[in-house]
Image (cartoon, rainbow, N blue to C red):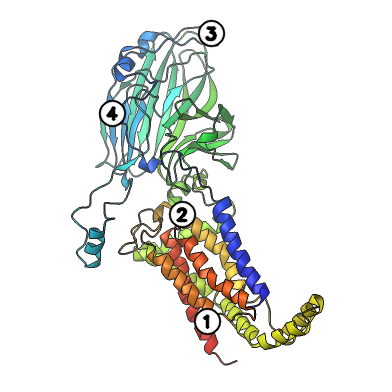
Amino acid sequence: MDKRTFLAVVLSIAVLFIYQNFFVKQPDKKQTVPAQQQETPVAGQKTAQQPSAAAEKTAAPPATLSQTTGRMVAAKAVTGTDRDVVVATPLYRAVFTTRGAALKSFQLKQYRTSLENTDDLVDIVYRLIGKGKAKTEGQSRLIELVHVSEGMPRPLAVSFPDSTVNIPENGFYEADGSTLDMTGGSEPRRLTFTQTYPGEIRIEKIFTFHLEKFSFDLEVRVHNIAGTPLNQKGSLTWYQYVDPAAPTDSYGHDGPVSYIAKNMDRPAVKNMEADKVIGPDVSWGGFESKYFIASLIPQNPSLTSFGMSKDSSNLVAVSLMGPKNVIPAGQSGVYSYAIYLGPKDYNILKAQNIGMENAIDFGDWLKWLAIPLLITLKFLYGYIHNYGIAIIILTILIKLIFWPLGNKSYKSMKEMQKLQPKMVALREKYKDDKTRLSQESMALYKAHKVNPLGGCLPMVVQIPVFFGLYKSLLYAIELRHSPFFWWIQDLSAKDPYYITPIIMGATMFIQQKMTPSGADPMQAKIMLFMPIIFTFMFLNFPSGLVIYWLFNNIISIAQQVYINKQPS
């Protein structure tokens, strides 16, 4: 391997190192709680500087003074009983409260906070000897998307700021039921909450749930029962408490997210200082974690703005604001939304047809590779039902695509090896004349029809594919908690025992020993360190990515053996 090839390899490693450390977001050690690790607050739990549950129920919110008309909202309309309403579908279990007709809990039935308790040595031994799962394992908690402490406002609160009549977000509603069980049904079902301010307005929050969807509809109807027209501007808010001292995923973003005017915005919670309003042309906005999202979707994007704020207790609020309706006396105004609370599954998000697939952080440039690779993986998984094996098959397919280029590369390296004695002679003859040495070297390559850069082309070409697959395996929820075999039970996480990275490093060492080296002994020694460097870099990479690189090396070794056996 000559200096140009050596330089290309070093540059490739440098690109990988720089990308990993400077372009991949790594939040602080003290950051937010991932949605997949959040729990519903324990009953009776109190937070500093927050009202108790008893105070919350007995004290009615103060009347609100309209900035437009000066009329007072009747305080007696917001008194009532705090009662839960449960909605159950095959995909989730939601708990609403009549206080604000807001959301208290939203648990995803198909996703859990962590793998089952199979991490100890006894469980590994049980698996290796074919006894199945150990008796000590247990079920982890379901994913909870609502995370607010007692006394804090709850998600899906509705208000009407800058309107003729505003209403408190935590006013009491009357619900038309206590339980909505859709686990055995097939048709959409409705749940209606109603609140009345005598002589002013009547508010209806109508939720429509669908059997096999993570999304549901919300229609807010404002009935003008006053004698004069009302100017009402609707606002729908999702609240999320963020604990700044809690650990988080190294590469996840827990915070506000929006897709406005075809642009993604992901501000860090720690950098949020003042209220911020973006828009209009809001396709959707909400609160995300690495694998899950709570998204608010307006019916009229061109008339809607997106607001973000954070208070002193680290309660984050994201809101859809608008449109503004003029409601004549005796008539109604309607504000329509869709709510998506669920996983960042590419196919499900893509089906929303509003660009929600951009919530998966594949990157602006790499998504054109990451998405096809993910689609291919899912296609293969549909037949073999193991993403680890699907990654191996995908590796073979990628290698077949690059096979002709690989053959040319290995042949080029083989020819370069033949020229090494002549290159040594040229270096000795023109050691004091670098310009002449370069000219003579190029003449030698041209005479023997050898491309000095041909040996490093496969590695350089595969770097974008590597990064694309890296993004797919890192952010695709399909790989989350997806097992391969034995000790590898989560292809999106690192190998817990570092077995595959070490084997991968060994295959790189074998490859390095098979690769023709240059005449410079120091260069040859440096190249032997490359497998060690790569092994340490891959220790914390997703095990699925390590499997890809491992089998890529194995196939490359086989290809190089085949080329070396060919007659010159």
**Residue at label 3?**
69
Amino acid type for the residue under numbered disc 3 = Thr
The residue nearer to you, when weighing 455 against 419, is 419
Classify residue 420 by image quadrant: bottom right
Question: Which three-letter amino acid code belongs to the residue tagged 1?
Answer: Gln
What residue would you read off at disc 4?
A: 85
Instruction: Mark 2 or mark 4: name the one nearer the start of the chain.
Output: 4
Query: Mark 4 is on which residue type?
Result: Val
Give the structural element (helix, strand or loop) at label 1: helix
Instruction: Give the crowd class for mark 3: few <14, some 14-19, many >=20 residues within 10 Å.
Output: few
x and y, in percent, of residue 558 in the image: 47, 80
Residue 560: mark in rendering = 1
SS label for mark 4: strand
Instruction: Identify the mark nearer the N-term, 2 or 3.
Output: 3
Q: CA distance from mark 4 to mark 3?
A: 35 Å
From what the image shows, is residue 82 above or below residue 42?
Answer: above
Task: For residue 191, say whether it is visible.
Answer: yes
- Say few, some or many: other residues with alpha carbon within 10 Å of mark 1 (under 14 / 14 to 19 / 20 or more): many
